[in-house]
Amino acid sequence: MLWLCLHLPDFALEIFARGMSVTGPLAVVHGQGRRQRVVLCNAAARRCGVRPGMGTGAALALAGSLRICGRDVESERAALDRLAGWAGRFTPVVSRMPPQALLLEIAGSCRLFGGVDRLQDMVRRGVAELGYQVSMAAAPTPLAASWLVHAGQDVCVIQQSALAAALSPLPLACLGLAAERQEVLHGMGIRTVGDCLRLPRDGLARRMGPQLVYVLDQALGRIPDPRPAFVAPAAFTGSLPLPAPACTAEGLLFPVRRLLLELEGFLRARDQGARSLVLSLRHASGTATRLGLGLVVPSRDAAHLAMLMRERLERVALPAPVEEVSLHVARPCPLAPHSQDFFAPTHVAEDGVLIERLRARLGRAAVHGLGLVAEHRPERAWACAEPGEQGTAAGTESGRQARGSAHASWGAVARKRPLWLLRDPVRLEVHGGHPYLDGTLVIAGNRERIESGWWDGQDIARDYFVVRTRQGARLWVYRELDGGRCWFLHGIFG
């Protein structure tokens, strides 16, 4: 086995700072009243003299523009869970080490990603894109990997036989011992893990208790050290508090992109995609603006989703500044494997992107496809459908009974009709017994008689003709078989 430990030293600060690009001083505080102390601060605050452990009043005196965020343990827990779900794209075995570390078992993944060094580089770049600083170390046991990374050792120990040499220089603080136990060991002249390993096991157990020997054996791989595997939830929900309210849609793209990167890792780990997303923008009043985004085909590409979200956000007028951004995907769907056709036209995928961009900009109801309905009446022979859907929609049960064997020939008939039908047929003038529109219309083909609809009270009886105008345009007209036998223009051919 090979365990990769990810340690996030500034995790409590970064869950706020990663929400937007912060250039000024920022600090996370904990406690109430006079006991409130700085837990972490960014580089800009440190340049002003702010340090962890300092009181809030003293910090503000040193940096008047200091932004202060109260430590949010619940947000840290949720962010660590989302990071664990994202890390599942690299390995199926991820274990949490609260409050700010993860363990990834990568022995089976190294070959897939091109070796351990390349895998570590990919993890490091991915975590940086999410907005976190990370320290990493790899070792055959999870405890050894965590000790190495907490000691600042960015190393990769492959062989278990090399563990003792790699762990020996580490200070006793890596063991996580209580302060009084460390003082006892210091009094014995023990300063490093190697010093502990050189002591007789029985004597060390009698003096310090069997737990220390047990932990050392786990770190060296002499006894098992099972770790609970993280199980990702079925749905994705991610929230990102902002260190300062965002007043424009452009200012929201930065945190939204980071949530989409988390979503991409979550979906890749499950080999799924998202077909609908909901973005929630929470305001100071507690109200929220919710934006939905629907896709033609499921996707998990963060860059593609970010482009669509940009189009969606540009259409939104924010009623108030935004303090928190949340992203929710309720029902991820599997991505069906498919083979690419070597001769397939390249514009197919581009059409889907165009449709999604138009829907993001104009709204879902403004962009749709046309589906055929098994119906002879032209005005009822189509229906709105999802773009790209194939097949013919079925009519009512009574319609199916009345049409009978007409289904077989309906498709061929429908293909002879024009694509553009007028919303309401236009009555034509008649000159000398012939239909007239800026000149006498010349019949250019055989008639098509349609008598249908008697079962629903909307029956028609018409003779349809293809005609040509004096300018050469092709029109679709009909003459009523009942009543006044009037002529009407119903469609225009391209």
Image (tube, helix red, strand yellow):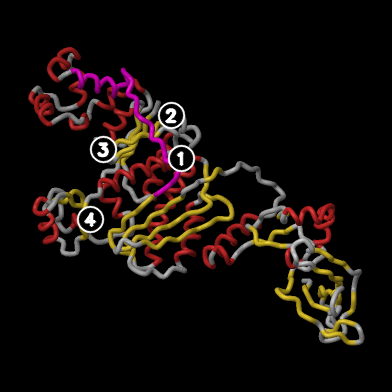
Task: Categorize mark 1 by other alpha carbons within 10 Å: few (<14), some (14-19), many (20+).
Answer: some
Question: Are the two marked residues, 1 and 3, in contact with CB atoms closer than 8 angstroms?
Answer: no
Q: Nearer the viewer, mark 1 or mark 3?
A: 1
Instruction: Report the span colored magenta.
Output: 210-237
Q: Earlier in the sequence, mark 1 or mark 4?
A: 4
Q: Quickly name the residue at label 4.
A: 69
* Front position among marks 2 and 1: 1
**Quadrant position of the N terminus in the picture:** top left
Please tell me whether mark 4 or mark 3 is closer to you in this view: 4
As drawn, the label of residue 245 is: none
Give the alpha-carbon distance from disc 2 to disc 1, as whole Å.
Answer: 14 Å
The residue lying furthest to the top in this view is 202
Q: What amino acid is labelled 2 in the image?
A: Ala
Indicate the quadrant where residue 382 lies: bottom right
Mark 1, secondary structure of its residue: loop
Q: Earlier in the sequence, mark 3 or mark 2?
A: 2
Q: Is residue 218 magenta?
A: yes
Residue 89 is labelled as: 1
- Residue occupying image coordinates x 78% and y 68%: 418
* In the depicted structure, whether residue 274 falls above or below residue 101: below
Q: In the shown orientation, is residue 69 left or right of residue 363?
A: left
- Residue at image coords 36%, 69%: 319
Name the residue nearer the viewer: 436 or 134.
Answer: 436
- Tell me where residue 36 appears, x and y as whole percent: 13, 51
